[in-house]
Image (cartoon, helix red, strand yellow):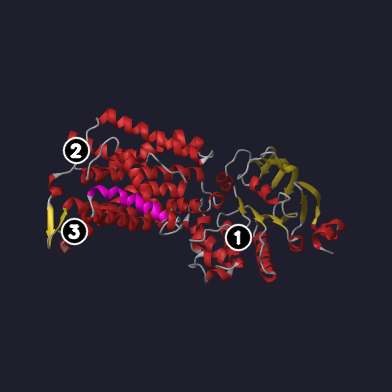
Amino acid sequence: MLEVKDLSVRYGDAHVITGVSFQAARGAITCILGPNGSGKTTLLRCITGLVSPASGRIMFDGQNLQGKKPHEIVRMGLIMIPEGRRLWPPLTVEENLKMGAYLVNEQARIDGQLSYVFDLFPHLGSRKNQLCGTLSGGELQMVAIGRGLMGFPRLLLLDEPSLGLAPLVVREVFRAVEKIVDAGTTVLLVEQNTQVALSVAVYGYILEIGSIALESDAASLRENSHVKEAYLGL
Amino acid sequence: MISATSVVQSLLSGMAEGVNYSLYCLGLAFVFGIVRIINLAHGEFLVLGGYIAYWLLVKWGVNPLLALPLAAAMAGVAAFVSYRVFLQRIRTSSELNTLILTFGLGIFLANLYLQLWTADIRNIGVDWMEQPLSFFGIYVSVGEILTILISLAVVFGLYFFLTRSRTGMAIRVTAIDRDAAALAGINVERVDLVAFTIGGLLAGVGGPLLGMLAHISPGAGLHITVKAFILTVLAGVGSIPGLLVAGMILGVGEALTVTFINASYRELFGFALFIAILVIRPSGLFGRRL
């Protein structure tokens, strides 16, 4: 569904990403793992059009994303939940969610999707009129995912959804992600939490210093000695 | 002689003036808060609105109040063209560039007005609006009451536009977090253009009011821009209701200065206030929230 080929990104003279290629298969969770500063977030910002690549190609559903603006990419059904949630604190939960449906015109579809999000995260229902500035980290992440879902994504990019969350909350968030995939949305997951990511993904890539160091199906990555040592702490 | 009536009179006219100040500076504050451009041509956009009303009045006898929509529209067009043709190209470079560019634009417009409408000072008052009404010895003109109502309507109108409408919300969330807005599918570059144009519309509404209450001249714009800048700093960037309060403070302060000290210290009050705020509370009275 998403195919990235030989992608390179530079900030000035600094090569952040060099020659990265990977794919995200339809209907499944693909994960990209790697330590801080390996270029994961830059990679996602590039796919979503916030940063332009120096070279390489990004194909989404057979269409080249080159030169497309972020809002055009969103319209195609590729939606990112950014690292650190990036919600709008002065807005209520419901307002944040509804802004996620900015490009959706039919009120009925918006309402339907809103109740889907509240079904997925029953927690949020009672908080819908609360300002986002007053929520806990886990709730914020749920609103962030919900906001992404409001735009009817076909491919959802998740940037470090587990960041700063308690283990119990992480599990809750990932159960929801699995439900989203079951409902037909493809997910590309970028994580530092290797254990959780490999437990839900079918295929994984390891990004180190801006290049893909390793790729394999999730089961063999879990058994890989380099991954075990460097990422799982075993 | 200072009597209770003269105190009340100057408080009231100060508040009236203050509400109109809020309107005069609304466009500048709005554009600064949303697009992060300090539009030094703001005053010239406002004066353009005033001249449109002047033209309609002298050519066809149109009441300046009826000229408001056209005045706003023309200033809006001026802002749209300025942004589309010039500002958009240099948006991403250093902030100083937008400052220099809008300053130049202001000079150009002021001189254009000089060509079109001469250097004469114009008042576009209408007789029936200058009729004073008296309440217990306090005087207020029909025009003052009308302009206050219009100013309040525009300020609150903008507030409701930003908090209730789809486009308004898009503008607001773009100002809060630009990337997050882009990722929600909002065309953030378009938001910049729309916001800058709205800034022009808002300035355009102020022009006829200024022409009715005082006067307009080709060089009046810079004066307005400076005042708008003082108010924006006083209110704190991004606070629209705060602008009303800041406008009142400036208006009342000026009126009291005129009544109790000397009319020639009037402008000094504004600048003293400006410096005091920068020293004591640089984020303004009402912080930064939108």
Circle nearer the viewer, 1 or 3: 3
- Number of marks: 3
Q: What residue range appears in magenta?
A: B263-277
Please, what is the three-letter code of the amino acid marked with disc 2? Answer: Leu
Q: Is residue B93 above or below residue B128?
A: above
- Residue B253: percent from left, percent from top: 28, 56
Q: Which mark is residue B57?
A: 2
Q: Residue at x 12, y 60 (%)?
A: B137
- Return the chain for callout 1: A
Per the image, label 3 sits on a secondary structure element best described as helix
Cα–Cα gap, marks 1 and 3: 57 Å
In the displayed structure image, the side of residue B124 where residue A58 appears, left or right: right
| A39 or B24: nearer the viewer | B24
Marks 2/3 same chain: yes
Pick whichever, A155 or B282, lies toward us: B282
Q: Which residue is mark 1?
A: A145
Residue A139 lies, in percent from the top left, at 59, 67
Residue underneath mark 3: B9
Which type of secondary structure does the marked residue at label 1 adopt?
helix
> Which is closer to the viewer, label 2 or label 1?
2
Q: Residue furthest right?
A: A225
Direction from residue A33 to residue A47 in the image, left or right:
left
Q: Is residue B218 above or below residue A167?
A: above
| Amino acid of disc 1 | Ile
Whole-Å distance between the Cαs marked 2 and 3? 31 Å
The verdict on a common chain for dots 1 and 3 is no
Rendering coords of residue B72 (x, y %) = 31, 42
Decide: few, some or many residues near mark 2? Use Cα within 10 Å; few <14, some 14-19, many ≥20: some
Q: Quadrant of residue A9?
A: top right
User: How many C-alpha atoms fall within 10 Å of the one at disc 3: few (<14), some, or many (≥20)?
Assistant: some
